[in-house]
């Protein structure tokens, strides 16, 4: 009996030690199952779809709208995006540093933005209007001032985009 | 007794399950690293030879999109951080003799239009030198100077300037601090530096430029010259200077009014900014 208790104590101790090294086990497992091939957070501006000239609303060949944004300490880039109302809009976002979250105030939508991964979601904004986009995940000292803006305009006022055009707007 | 042994059996079963789980996790981890090391050389070649070259032609949005604009060749990867942190301050001291004429013997410039380099953050100094070198940040004076410096030279200089004291010394700091021309703007400056303006998407200066927190590549501003700061804010907002990674500083400077730019830079230039010494 005493032996079993001793062995159990040793095993428990080993488990505690192992659990403190969890992240060393966790990441390789994550990569093994196909994770971790997202954009490289410190090198977003060098290559890939999140280079600064590719940010903003873009129109695909079939007329679908895609908005690409970066969340970083403590600004969203671009700070203001313009989309048409009543049309499905795909948001593709990534973070350059830490976990951010944004919610479109006044709508039911929100997005969690994680470094090293692309968050993709398709939203349809029914009503035209201007919606604040505050950061909803504590991201650092300037978190409370991290805000963007979503401008939803009536569909007929949204001029269609050229293939190479990226649309943003001025935050005011 | 029988009850106690039943409990023991149950504990042993639980522990056994846990051990099996742990072992399988570790095995998977090991398999992954070995798979990576063994499979990469074999699989990397065909991947780079065919599908990658085929992909941008058909699917990548960057191809159909506008021409790619790269603001700066510097990215804060592990290798970059290692190059910068390996800088040798003594070698930097010897190299810094050529900087003395404009940036002062002690890192405080004699003219308020030139930046003070004393206490400058290593990463931001190194990044600016690289950007001068590659022409991503335009300056007729600094570009040829930076082109004569290697990556290591810049890292050494960065280490030296980071080491210089920022203490206020009337004998050495001839241009700093400057008097604040319009003291009425003090409250405006404090509001922006400490609180920012969330409604307009302006984070507080001190959340990236210290002392509250720092972001990689953001220089401390507490002992920076006002004229220089105002000029740079102006350049950021009108796009003359565009070497900030991910449009960060350009977005913020665009939101500032001309009066706010003057207020903030004059406040820092007067040595009133948070984090002095």
Image (spheres, coloured by chain):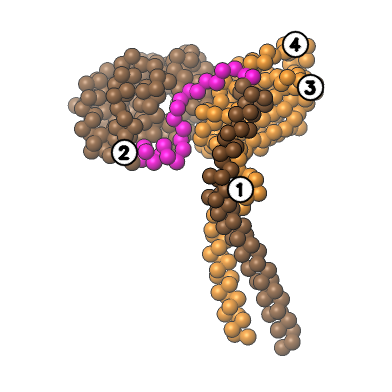
Q: Is residue B79 above or below residue B111?
A: below
Residue nearer the viewer, A95 or B265: A95
Q: Residues within 10 Å of mark 2 (few under 14, many from 20)?
A: many
Task: Name the chain under label 1.
Answer: A
Could you tell whether B239 is left or right of B84 in the image? right
Numbered label attached to residue B87: 2
Could you tell whether B61 is left or right of B240 in the image? right
In this rendering, do the residues under marks 1 and 3 share a single chain?
yes
Counting residues from the N terminus, which is met first, the one under dot 1 or under dot 4?
Answer: 1
Label 2 sits on a secondary structure element that is loop
Could you tell whether B228 is left or right of B21 in the image? left
Q: Select label 1 or label 3 by which is in front.
A: 1
Numbered label attached to residue A87: 3
Q: Colour of chain B?
A: brown
User: What x and y, as percent, mark residue B142?
Assistant: 32, 19
In this rendering, do the residues under marks 3 and 4 share a single chain?
yes
Residue at (39%, 16%) from the top-left corner?
Answer: B138
Could you tell whether A121 is left or right of B153 in the image? right
Question: What is the CA distance from the residue labelled 4 to the residue labelled 2?
Answer: 55 Å
Q: Residues within 10 Å of mark 3 (few under 14, many from 20)?
A: some
Q: Which residues are magenta?
A: B64-85
């Amino acid at each position: 009996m005493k032996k079993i208790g001793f062995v159990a104590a040793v095993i428990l101790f080993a488990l505690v030690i192992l659990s403190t090294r969890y992240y060393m086990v966790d990441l390789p497992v994550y990569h093994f199952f196909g994770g971790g091939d997202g954009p490289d957070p410190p090198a977003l501006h060098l290559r890939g779809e999140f280079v600064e000239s590719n940010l903003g609303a873009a129109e695909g060949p079939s007329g679908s709208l895609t908005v690409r944004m970066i969340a970083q300490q403590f600004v969203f880039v671009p700070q203001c995006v313009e989309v048409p109302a009543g049309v499905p809009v795909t948001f593709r976002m990534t973070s350059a540093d830490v976990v951010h979250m944004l919610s479109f105030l006044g709508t039911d939508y929100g997005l969690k933005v994680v470094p090293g991964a692309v968050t993709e979601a398709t939203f349809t904004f029914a009503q035209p209007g201007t919606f604040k986009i505050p950061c909803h995940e504590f991201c650092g000292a300037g978190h409370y001032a991290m805000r963007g803006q979503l401008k939803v305009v009536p569909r007929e006022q949204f001029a269609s985009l050229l293939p190479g055009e990226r649309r943003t707007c001025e935050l005011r | 007794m029988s009850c106690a042994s039943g409990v023991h059996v149950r504990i042993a079963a639980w522990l056994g399950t846990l051990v099996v789980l742990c072992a399988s996790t570790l095995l998977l981890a090991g398999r992954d690293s070995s798979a990576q090391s063994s499979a990469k050389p074999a699989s990397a070649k065909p991947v780079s030879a065919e599908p990658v070259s085929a992909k941008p032609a058909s699917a990548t949005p960057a191809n159909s999109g506008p021409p790619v604009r790269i603001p700066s060749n510097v990215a804060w990867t592990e290798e970059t951080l290692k190059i910068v942190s390996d800088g040798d301050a003594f070698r930097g001291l010897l190299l810094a003799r050529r900087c003395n004429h404009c940036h002062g013997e002690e890192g405080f410039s004699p003219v308020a239009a030139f930046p003070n380099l004393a206490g400058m953050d290593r990463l931001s100094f190194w990044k600016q030198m690289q950007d001068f070198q590659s022409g991503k940040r335009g300056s007729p004076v600094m570009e040829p100077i930076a082109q004569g410096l290697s990556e290591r030279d810049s890292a050494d200089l960065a280490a030296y300037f980071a080491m210089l004291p920022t203490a206020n010394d009337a004998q050495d700091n001839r241009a700093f601090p400057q008097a604040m021309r319009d003291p009425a703007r003090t409250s405006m400056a404090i509001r922006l530096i400490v609180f920012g303006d969330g409604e307009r998407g302006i984070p507080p200066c001190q959340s990236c430029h210290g002392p509250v927190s720092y972001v990689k590549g953001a220089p401390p501003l507490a002992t920076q010259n006002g004229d220089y700061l105002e000029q740079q804010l102006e350049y950021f907002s009108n796009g003359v200077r565009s070497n900030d990674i991910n449009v960060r500083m350009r977005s913020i400077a665009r939101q500032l009014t001309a009066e706010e730019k003057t207020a903030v830079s004059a406040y820092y230039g007067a040595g009133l900014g948070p984090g002095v010494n």
